[in-house]
Amino acid sequence: MSARSYSLRHRLDVVAGVLLLAVAGAGITGLQDTVRQREAAIYLRALHEEERTVSAAALLVISDSESAATEVRSLLQDAERRLGTLLGGGALDLDGTPLMVGPGRGARLAAHLQRARDWIAATGTQVDLRPQELAARLREVQAHLQAAARAADRDAMAERVRAGWIQLVMILLATGCFLLGVAWLRRLVTTPLHRMADMIEEMLRTGRLIKLPVGARNELGIVSEGFNRLTVQAEEQKRRLREHIVELQRVNMELDQLAHVKDDFLMTINHQLRTPLTSVVEGIELVREEVGDSLSAGQREIMVTMDDNARRLAQLVDSMLDLQMLQSGRRPLSRRAASVQPVLQRVLATWQPVAEQRIIRLTAGALPEVYADPGAVGEVLDHLLRNALRHGPKGSVVDIQAQVSGEEVTVTVRDYGPGLTPEQLDKLFQPFVHVHTPDAPGRDGSGLGLAFCRQIVERHRGRIAAEVPPDGGLAVRFTLPVATPGFLFREACEQAQETAEQGHFGVLLVDTSGPAGERVHQHLRANTHHGDAFVALEDGCLAIVAATDAAGFEAMQRRLRQVLEQAEVSCAMGAAHSARAGAAPEALRAAAQAALAGGRARIAAGGSGDRRT
């Protein structure tokens, strides 16, 4: 790697220095011009003052008073002295204000000043002349002073013109330096930066890494070299990432194969065990019924033990099969808006007779409908009650509580047994993990019941957790979503996104708030696909969620419009598709509502109510 060079910074410093010198030169020239103009103004003021002094002396001569000669001599002496100061320079007192002036500035001005001084000196020695002669001499002096003033004014004007030209030259020089510096910087900085920006844009557009050209050995070259090194490193990282992706894909394929092997193995074992276990259970039952009292007490105990173990094994096989079907998605859930009260009553009626001296206490007020599979929720309650009855001591109470918490219904099953430690709570919902205390009653179990419950609850978009209350026992709490229109709409969008190709789906809002709303609903349901979801929203609109691409969604809208036109039903529609408005349900709903508002406005104006997205 070559040594770094910061020549561009030095060149910029040179350009800035030249511009600074040009500006400073123009400023100095302007300051000098101001000083010269001030001196010229002082000269003109002094000359006019001398002219007034001579005029005053002339008036005194004409007045012919007794003291005129003395006053004239005094005035002329003062004028001679001041003219000497103007010629040689020094401090000049004008109206009580001391002003410094330099020596006579031009030859013509100095000549006029010298003549005027000579005339004043000669006239001052001849004040006894006749008034007419003395006045003529004073007029001559006044003429020389006026000529000197004109000469001073011409010199000042010439000086200002000369200073203006100098300033103009300095401004032109600074402007030229600025333009040259701009052109130079454009060639050295702007053009390479534009080229680098274009190449970076090309990399962003194509995804290919391109090395930037390294021009001059300056700061831009350093940046280009650094970018190229980063490009090489990024290319190497991409290569390694591709290798990791390939390796991960291979590992994922192996894991998928192992998962399929495991699933197939478990399914095979379950099915292979179910038939012989059923035969064993039935055989033991037949033997016990046929032999009857001929068995001894020991044989009868052995038969009871065999029957219990066979039934436990059959129950374990059933639990494994149910859990495996849930995890693999082979067990569908028939979720719908349903009341949880009948499920709670059925579970209570089923388990109270077999509670073995335990009381099941149900506490549930008015509950809204939940979006759930009642049969699956009943299985969850069966598992939780079985565990609670198994671990609760005889004579204790098992509480079932159901209450509304926001947009969820929370169901809690609590026993008053020995409870669990925090470490055991962490493992409670893991499959094949049986946590218990050594002295707990009913400590035998498969360890699959709570894992099954967790799968069911999570597939309902709910949560399940366990805690040890302060007064002992164990409380298992799970939630079910309330079947609100907002939740049903979000659920329909998520299901459509999961089932659609590339996750594309559309939302069609139909205004069914009018008198023909029921007819519109019926026509739409009769002319849509079986997989399209219908959700009645709070604002009187019907939302149709269809898992399809943009073209299919447009075709569906046209078909539904034709159906409603043939039925002579008018209603406003608003549609939005995930390919345009995004996949978030809230964004799609907002876009469709905006389109629906436009459709309502057109219907109010007498036009068509449909709207294309």
Image: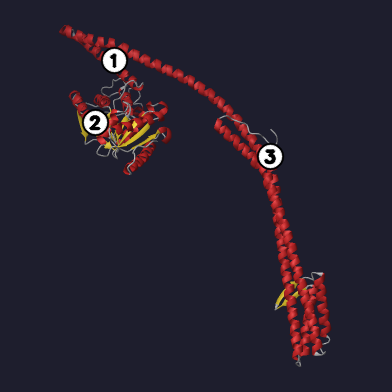
Residue visible at 77% across and 88% down? 61
Which quarter of the picture shows residue 498? top left
Closer to viewer: mark 2 or mark 1: 2
Considering depth in this image, is 449 or 19 the residue closer to the camera? Answer: 19
In which image quadrant can residue 580 be found? top left
x%, y% of residue 556? 35, 30
| N-terminal label among 2 and 1 | 1
Residue position marked by numbered label 1 in the rendering? 313
Query: What whole-number distance in Å separates the C-alpha atoms at marks 2 and 3?
Result: 76 Å
Q: Amino acid at mark 1?
A: Leu
**Residue type at numbered disc 2:** Val
Query: What percent of the width, then of the height, locates residue 152?
Result: 76, 71
Q: Residues within 10 Å of mark 3 (few under 14, many from 20)?
A: some
Q: CA distance from mark 1 to mark 3?
A: 81 Å
Q: CA distance from mark 2 to mark 1?
A: 32 Å
**Tag of residue 340:** 2
Q: Which mark is residue 218?
A: 3
In the image, residue 71 above or below residue 557 = below
Q: Is residue 231 visible?
A: yes
Mark 1: give few (<14), some (14-19) or many (20+) Cα within 10 Å.
some
- Relative placement, left or right, of 391 versus 265 is left
| Residue type at tag 3 | Asn
**Residue for point 37% across, 41% down:** 594
Look at the image and tell me in which quarter the N terminus lies.
Answer: top right
